[in-house]
Image (spheres, grey):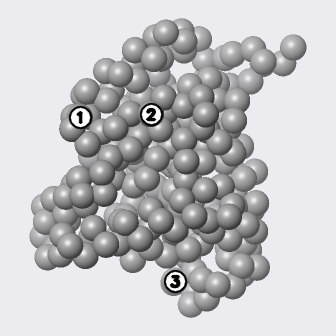
Amino acid sequence: MTTTAPVIAVDGPSGTGKGTLCARLAEGLGWHLLDSGALYRAVALAALAAGVDLDDESALARLAAGLQLDFTAAADAGIGVHLGGEDVTERLRTEDCGAAASRVAACPAVRTALLARQHACRRAPGLIADGRDMGTVVFPDAVLKIFLTASAEERARRRHKQLKEKGMNVSLAQLFQDIAGRDERDRERSVAPLRPAVDATVIDTTQLSVEDVLAVVRRLVRERDLKTGTTHV
């Protein structure tokens, strides 16, 4: 019998509240955080900065292998990201970076390069893993699997509100088109397509507040007695 740190996998498309949920869970349990989406966004950001073609799979894989990322619970209740010691949280959240990351994530060599890095984040007392294939590919033995979803219209509205609060003039219609297009690419890609694990609890957050979602997930955590920091497999 071996002992390994437990994982709570939280999957789903962007704009469903995964980052906030994961940060609150990690803070409450005292567990580590992994934002796998930020890994792909960081590869995309590095590629854009270096002028690397987003179709050059080998060059993207080399960038992925050399990333130095750290995750923390951010002040806005999301997940903060540091790349090489620099806070790049806001740069990773831009629409351009998100669109580029969707293309990068479709590259098998990039996903292979990042898989070991994601596995290395699994440390005691436990890990909260935010992504799109955490429960299906990266941590199929996660002790709890959550899949958050919400309508594309609601996710575009939430993103529009966030950007307007930052003083950015953006088109709600364009945001909706971008989100719908990204969803389609993520669902249809040949490697690790976006879908809930067969044993995941699916939560539609369209009409739910952050506290509503937290209440549901905290109940599931209590039911699995995820307080000890280790689980036997």
Q: How many marks?
A: 3
Residue 72: mark in rendering: none
How far is mark 2 from mark 1, CA to CA?
13 Å
Which residue in the structure is indicated by mark 3? 48
Q: Residue at x 49, y 9 (%)?
A: 223
Above or below for 157 versus 199? below
Q: Which residue is mark 2?
A: 202
Q: Which quadrant of the figure contains the C terminus? A: top right
* Dot placed on the residue nearer the N-terminal end, 2 or 3: 3
The amino acid type, in three-letter code, at marker 1 is Leu
108 versus 157 height, above or below? below
- Coordinates of residue 126 in the picture (x, y in percent): 60, 27
- Residue drawn at x 64%, y 84% is 55
Specify the amino acid type for callout 2: Val
Q: Is residue 7 visible?
A: no
Residue contact between numbered discs 2 and 1, judged by CB atoms under 8 Å: no
What residue sits right under mark 1 in the picture? 208
